[in-house]
Amino acid sequence: MQIIGERINSSRKPILEALQRKDVSFIQDEARRQEEAGSAFIDINAATMHSQEPEYLVWLVKTVQGAIQAPLSIDSTNAQAIQEALKAHKGQAMLNSITGERKRFEALLPLILEYKPVVVALCLDDQGMPGSVEDRLRVVSHLLKALGDAGVPHEDIYFDPLVKAVSTGTSFGIEFLESVRAIKKEFGVKTIAGLTNISYGLPQRKLLSRAFTVMALAAGLDALIIDPLDQTLASLVKASLALLGKEGSMRDYIKAFREGKLIIS
Amino acid sequence: MQIIGERINSSRKPILEALQRKDVSFIQDEARRQEEAGSAFIDINAATMHSQEPEYLVWLVKTVQGAIQAPLSIDSTNAQAIQEALKAHKGQAMLNSITGERKRFEALLPLILEYKPVVVALCLDDQGMPGSVEDRLRVVSHLLKALGDAGVPHEDIYFDPLVKAVSTGTSFGIEFLESVRAIKKEFGVKTIAGLTNISYGLPQRKLLSRAFTVMALAAGLDALIIDPLDQTLASLVKASLALLGKEGSMRDYIKAFREGKLIIS
């Protein structure tokens, strides 16, 4: 199971302000702490810089890679920003994200073939947000073929089933969990998700997001886009992996305990 | 989903001491608090009183039923204690537990037919503890037929797949979760479990037990034998049920929030 550290996102006010003043040490510190907490990739997002997104995303690539070894997840919907960021990135980046939408796919495929990033593929196409497990399986099937035909190895693709808020539909939690199981069973590919959306519009969001993270891991989710500095969540993740018998997880759990990093309340 | 409150157990020192001095108000207070926390049944266990177990179990039935409306779970392996407790109990009790072991089953079946309790059936027979999902399905199949043939309605039976500590086998967590799914899928019957054993021998046991409770609910477990006064666990249970779209669960979640009962940390 891999953690993608989500903190360096310009939608967060402290990050936006650090970007605006190009505060190298603030950003590098954010990156370092997430790497030390075990992140396999550090996500970077400068979307709220609008027309200046390409410039700031490249600045983030250089600034963060100046401080840490972990590769970055280039988090953008702007093809120009993605291209410049991938070009500036050393080593294999993650591209977050492509979709089955024809225009977006066609704009990004050449960049994928040129820079060979690990790809996050959202289960979304020109028919819109998925409304069922079957909608997601259709998008996975289509994208797996299209990417495979273009030469992208299946092991470089993570599918994101897309979480929808349970406040807008009581079945959306179950639908997501069943989608993770079905995608893995049908296609044997990797899955990834950010889960905080599940609790949108409800009180005590962290409580819901934590419980849902445990459920998603039990369903087989392979990668989590989370705040790795949330120690209660990180402790639940470690406990979950140990309970699921994941390789090395019991050793990690005991090690985290010895280091005083397992938080209960 | 139903909660069985597990606190009135003579293996807990404060309960043992209250039993020894026949402290009515202490026991009734324990019962009341568990009922108020939403327990559908209050478990009573006096096993550590040994030869005096029947006397003390009957005393517990009368004492607890003098204070609350919720029925009791008669938790014993002593046929005489079970018989006297069921006889003293008003309304439909729960019998915790029978197994597929021939002698135990034959001793308890007449009591089940006479007093008609809800029955907890452990997935265990004369071949010993279950070593696989299939072992459990075999016991369920056998017991369902034996109880059904004797006239016990299927809706009055809860099967306990039996949790084994992950410290003794890394696959035991997954095996339990798959057993819950398989029992429900194959036979459409209800499942129940106490989950604290999962974390035996490991540090930060509560962290593991909480995460496993969330996983078990996602797998479809119908009843939980827990300490309903552990507010963090109770909050995770409420969050889990809301995430799983269980009937009435979102309303319960919001209500618990408004009453200040949802604990995060």
Image (cartoon, coloured by chain):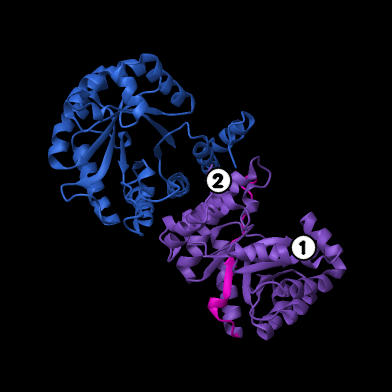
Chain colours: A purple, B blue
* Residue ID at (40%, 38%): B224
Respond whether the residues carrying marks 2 and 1 are from the same subunit.
Answer: no
Mark 2, secondary structure of its residue: helix
Circles 2 and 1 in contact, beta carbons < 8 Å: no
The one nearer the camera, B193 or B9, is: B9
Q: Quadrant of residue A33?
A: bottom right
* Residue ID at (22%, 43%): B143
Mark 1, secondary structure of its residue: helix
Q: CA distance from mark 2 to mark 1?
A: 36 Å
Q: Is residue A155 magenta?
A: yes
Q: Is residue B171 magenta?
A: no
Q: Quadrant of residue B78?
A: top left
The residue most toward the front is A259
Which residue is identified by label 1?
A26
Q: Where residue A173 sits in the image (x, y, percent)?
A: 56, 50
In which quadrant is the N terminus of chain B drawn? top left
Instruction: Label the magenta part by its dominant secondary structure.
Output: loop
Q: Where residue B22 sits in the image (x, y, percent)?
A: 31, 16
Q: Amino acid at mark 2?
A: Leu
Horizontal relation, residue A254 to residue B89: left or right = right
* Residue ID at (38%, 54%): B173
Magenta range is A151-172
The one nearer the camera, A149 or B158, is: B158
Q: Amino acid at mark 1?
A: Phe
Horizontal relation, residue B248 to residue B189: left or right = right
